[in-house]
Image (tube, rainbow, N blue to C red):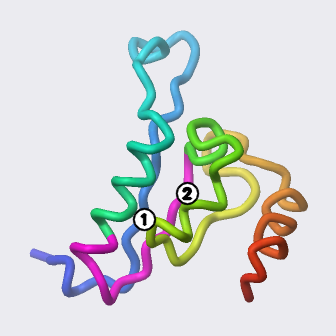
Amino acid sequence: MLGAEDVDRVCLNFFIPVKGTRLEGATPMKPLEILKTIAVYRLFFPSKDINVCAGRELHLRDMQGMIFLAGASATMIGNYLTQEGRAPEDDLQLLRDLEMEW
């Protein structure tokens, strides 16, 4: 069985409710809860890449750039497998504003 020591990257996805499903009305995590969750993962996995993907634009809104202050090392830009994300241009501008390299 694989353990955390066997992976290079830990991906965090935050629930995106889908209309017409039983969980469409599920209570989303609050932005600060998400940032705290990222920070806890950074503490537990100090040598791993923490990649924040689905749900960040929905739940974090204007606080998306703070994922990197909380401990994230990467994010996915554009669309996801089954859901639309933000426009890639918006994500790239966020990374430029944070003076991040890619």
4 left or right of 73? left
Which amino acid, mark 1? Cys
Give the spatial CA distance, label 1 vs label 2: 7 Å
Q: Residue 67: x, y in percent? A: 54, 62
Task: Name the foreground residue: 53 vs 70.
Answer: 70
Left or right of 40, for residue 82: right
37 relative to 72 in the view: left or right: left
| Residue 40, percent from left and from top | 28, 63
- Disc 2 residue type? Cys
Asked whether residue 8 is drawn in magenta, I would say: no
Element type where label 2 sits in the image: loop
Q: Is residue 7 left or right of residue 60?
A: left
Q: Position of residue 11 (x, y in %)?
A: 42, 65
Q: Quadrant of residue 100?
A: bottom right
Residue at the spot of label 2: 53
The question of residue 43 being in magenta is answered with yes
Element assignment for label 1? strand
Report the residue at 19% width, 86% height from top: 5
Give coordinates of residue 30: x percent, y percent.
45, 34
User: Which residues make up the magenta segment?
Assistant: 42-54
Query: Which residue is tagged 1?
Result: 11
Return the disc, 1 or 2, that comes first in the chain's sequence: 1
| 61 up-or-down from 39: above or below | above
x 34%, y 54%: residue: 37
Q: Is residue 87 above or below residue 51?
A: above
- On-image quarter of the C terminus: bottom right
4 and 82: which is toward the camera = 4
Frontmost residue, 96 versus 49: 96
Residue 67 - label: none
Mark 1 crowd level (few <14, some 14–19, many ≥20, 10 Å Cα): some
The answer to the question of whether label 1 and label 2 lie on touching residues, with beta carbons closer than 8 A, is yes
- Name the residue at 30% across, 66% down: 41
